[in-house]
Image (tube, grey):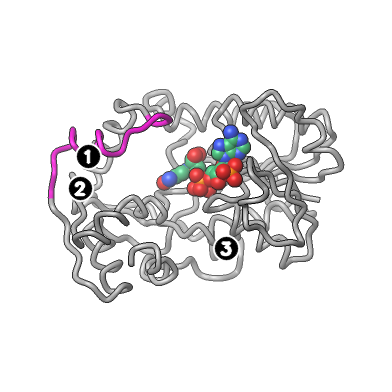
C-alpha cells in the first residue's frame, strides 16, 4: 500500500489515479475527505499534517510514501518521514525541486534550502529514496487565470524568460514508477524532471490563448510588483523576489536545461505546454 500526501493537489490527484490504474492500494491523505473528490477505490483518510494528530495510523501497513512539502510544510514533512521510519515503510519518493543542485548554491536561496534540507532528512532516514526534482510547474500559470478570464492580459516582469514547464501528470507518472518499483532501479536517484521543450512566458500566455480560443497578451511590470503579487502567507516577499530575479536571468539564457527523465523513466514523451493548456482550458475560460 502506498501513502500519498497532498493527495488532492496538482501532483497528488494525478498520482492517486495513476497508482490505482496500476492496481496499487492507495491511502490518500487530505484535510477534508468529504470535499476531496478522490476515487472511491482509494482509502481516503483525514489528516492535517500540521496538527497534533497521531501520524502512526496514517503510515501503518504502508510499503511506500509519496512525500510532498506542499502538504503542511517542512516540519510536517519531517514528522511524516519520522512516522514512516517507525512504521517500517520501505521506500519514500520525495517531491523535491530543480532548485537543489548539490552545490553550496543550495544555501543561497529559500526554495533550494527548504528542499535540500528535506532531501538530507530523507537520505538520513535509512529508507530507500528517490527524489523527483521538478522544474517550473505548468500549474504555476494557473495564477494567471483570473486576469486571463477578466481581460486576457497577464502581468509579468520577464515575458522573455525561458522555461521548460512540466505537466503535473508527468511528475506523477515519474513518481508512480519509483513508488511501484521493486527492482531498485530508481533507488538513490535524484531525477531532474522538466517539460520536453523550452517555452518563454509570452509563448505560454499565447498557448493558453490558443487553447481557449481568445486573444491573450503579456504586459510588463517591475520585479517589485511581480514579487508582491506572487508572495503570500507561505511564500515571503524576499523569496518571491529571488524567484522573479531568477526568471530575469532566464531571458535569452543560452541553454535552459531540458531533461529526458519523463521519457526515460515512464517510456512516454513528456507532455508539452500546449497539451497542458488544452488539458486546463476550463481553468482559464
Ligand atoms: N511550483 C513549482 O514550480 C515547483 C517546482 C518544484 C517543486 N515544487 C514543489 O511542489 C510542491 C507543490 O506540489 P503540488 O503542486 O502538487 O501541491 P498543491 O497542489 O499545492 O497541493 C498540496 C496539497 O497539500 C494538502 N495540504 C495543504 N496543507 C496541508 C496540511 N496542513 N496537512 C495535510 N495536507 C495539507 C492540500 O490538500 P487538502 O486541502 O486536501 O488537505 C493540497 O491539495 C511545492 O510545495 C514544492 O515543494 C514546486
> Which residue is found at the position 79% from the left and 54% from the top?
182
Graded by Cα atoms within 10 Å as few (under 14), some (14 to 19) or many (20 or more), the crowding at tag 3 reads few
**Residue 274 versus residue 24 in the image, above or below:** below
Q: Is residue 47 left or right of residue 172?
A: right
How far is disc 2 from disc 3 in space, using C-alphas?
A: 34 Å
- Find disc 1 in the rendering and name its residue: 226
**Residue 159 versus residue 117 in the image, above or below:** below
Percent of width and height locating residue 258? 40, 56
Does label 1 or label 2 sit earlier along the sequence?
A: 2
How far is disc 1 from disc 3 in space, using C-alphas?
A: 36 Å
Q: Nearer the viewer, residue 126 or 4?
A: 4
User: Residue 264 got which mark?
Assistant: 3
Graded by Cα atoms within 10 Å as few (under 14), some (14 to 19) or many (20 or more), the crowding at tag 1 reads many
Q: Is residue 269 left or right of residue 202?
A: right
Percent of width and height locating residue 116? 52, 30
Q: Secondary structure at mark 3?
A: helix
Does label 2 or label 3 sit earlier along the sequence?
A: 2
Tell whether circle 1 marks a residue whose Cβ is less than 8 angstroms from ligand 1: no
Placement of the C terminus among the 4 image quadrants = bottom left
Q: Nearer the viewer, residue 260 or 39?
A: 39
Amino acid at each position: 500500500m502506498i501513502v500519498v500526501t497532498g493527495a488532492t493537489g496538482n501532483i497528488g490527484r494525478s498520482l492517486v489515479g495513476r497508482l490505482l490504474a496500476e492496481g496499487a492500494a492507495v491511502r490518500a491523505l487530505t484535510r477534508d475527505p468529504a470535499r476531496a473528490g478522490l476515487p472511491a477505490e482509494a482509502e481516503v483518510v483525514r489528516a492535517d499534517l500540521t496538527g497534533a494528530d497521531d501520524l502512526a495510523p496514517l503510515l501503518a501497513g504502508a510499503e511506500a510514501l509519496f512525500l510532498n512539502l506542499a502538504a503542511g510544510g517542512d516540519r510536517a514533512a519531517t514528522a511524516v518521514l519520522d512516522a514512516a521510519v517507525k512504521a517500517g515503510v520501505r521506500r519514500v519518493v520525495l517531491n523535491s525541486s530543480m532548485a537543489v543542485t548539490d552545490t553550496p548554491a543550495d544555501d543561497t536561496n529559500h526554495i533550494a534550502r527548504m528542499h535540500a534540507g528535506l532531501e538530507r532528512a530523507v537520505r538520513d532516514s535509512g529508507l530507500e529514496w528517490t527524489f523527483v526534482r521538478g522544474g517550473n510547474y505548468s500549474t504555476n500559470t494557473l495564477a494567471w487565470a483570473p486576469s486571463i478570464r477578466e481581460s486576457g492580459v497577464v502581468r509579468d516582469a520577464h515575458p522573455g524568460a525561458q522555461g521548460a514547464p512540466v505537466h503535473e501528470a508527468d511528475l506523477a507518472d515519474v513518481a508512480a514508477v519509483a513508488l511501484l518499483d521493486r527492482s531498485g532501479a530508481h533507488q538513490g536517484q535524484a531525477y531532474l524532471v522538466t517539460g520536453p521543450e523550452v517555452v518563454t512566458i509570452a509563448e505560454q500566455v499565447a498557448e493558453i490563448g490558443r487553447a481557449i480560443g481568445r486573444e491573450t497578451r503579456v504586459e510588463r511590470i517591475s520585479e517589485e510588483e511581480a514579487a508582491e503579487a506572487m508572495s503570500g502567507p507561505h511564500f515571503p516577499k524576499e523569496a518571491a523576489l529571488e524567484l522573479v530575479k531568477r526568471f530575469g536571468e532566464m531571458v535569452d539564457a543560452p541553454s535552459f536545461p531540458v531533461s529526458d527523465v519523463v521519457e526515460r523513466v515512464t517510456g512516454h514523451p513528456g507532455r508539452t505546454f500546449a497539451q497542458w493548456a488544452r488539458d486546463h482550458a476550463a481553468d482559464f475560460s
